[in-house]
Image (cartoon, rainbow, N blue to C red):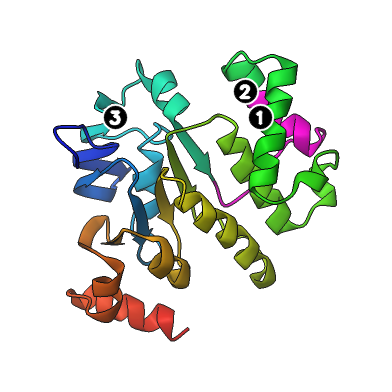
Amino acid sequence: MPGNAAPAILFDTVSKSFGDFRVLKDISLAIARGEKVVVCGPSGSGKSTLIRCINGLESIDTGRVEVDGVAVTPATLAAVRAKVGMVFQQFNLFPHLTVLENLMLGPMRARGLTRTDAKDIALRYLARVRIPEQADKFPRQLSGGQQQRVAIARSLCMEPAILLFDEPTSALDPEMISEVLVVMEELAHTGMTMIVVTHEMGFARRVADRMVFMDHGEIVETGAPQDFFTAPKSPRAQDFLQKILNH
C-alpha cells in the first residue's frame, strides 16, 4: 500500500454468529485500493457473510470493519454504501421498469441527479457491459446473462470505488457465465477495487491479485493465484482445489 494510505477495506478480528453457529471467527484481512481479491471455499464457509459485512448488510458481533479508514457502523452506513457497490446471485431488477429506468433510479434517488444526467450515465454503463441495445426492454425480455450485466451496470451507475460480487454467475446457465465474466474481467482492468466470491477458478487465475481461501468461518490461506493454484499450503485448500478443478 502506498505510503500510509488506509486500506480500501479492513477486517480487524471480526466475528459473527447466527444463533449458536459461528459463521465468522476472528477474521483479519486488509485489501488495498485497486486490489482484486477472489474469495473461495466450500459452501457454508462464511464467504458471502464476509463481504456482506463490508456494506452493513450483515452486522458483526465483535471486531471492526473499515471502508477507506471509516468504521462501518449504523451512523456511517449511508456514506459507506455510497462507496461500495454490490452484485448479487439474483439480479433483483424491477420487472415493471425498463432496463434504462432500472439504471436511472439509483442515481436520481440516492445521488440527486437530474433525469437527463441519470440517463447519460445509464447509457454509458450499458455500453460498458456491452448491451446498449437492450435499454428499452423489460427484464423479462432478457436472458439471465443479460440481466446480470444490467445488474452490474446498475451498480456502476452509482460510481462506487469498491465493487463486491457475491457468486454473480451461480444462478446462470453455463453458456451465459462467460459473457458475465468477460464484463467483470474488463472492469478489473479499470483500477477498481473488487472482491469476488466465486467458484470460477479460471476467472480467478486471470484476474485476481490475491486468493483468499475460507473454510468453517476462518481464512485458512491467502496468496497469489499462481502460488495458490500450483502449490496450496493447507490440506483443506488442497482438498478443495482437487474437488473443484476435477469437477
Residue 12, quarter of the rendered image = top left
Indicate the quadrant where residue 93 lies: top right
Q: Amino acid at mark 1?
A: Ile
Give the distance between the C-alpha atoms of the residues marked 3 and 1, in whole angstroms.
25 Å
Residue 23 in sight: yes
Residue reaching furthest bottom? 246
Question: What amino acid is labelled 3 in the image?
Answer: Asp
Q: Could you tell whether 4 is left or right of 118 in the image? A: left
Query: In the rendered structure, does residue 175 fall within the stretch colored magenta?
Result: no
Residue pointed to by mark 2: 107
Q: Position of residue 219 (x, y in %)?
A: 23, 57
The N terminus - image quarter = top left
> Image point 72% across, 35% down: which residue?
123
Q: Which residues lie in the magenta part?
A: 88-106
- Residue drawn at x 39%, y 49% is 195
How many C-alpha atoms fall within 10 Å of the one at disc 2: few (<14), some, or many (≥20)?
many
Residue holding disc 1? 121
Q: Is residue 105 magenta?
A: yes
Residue 170 visible from this viewpoint: no
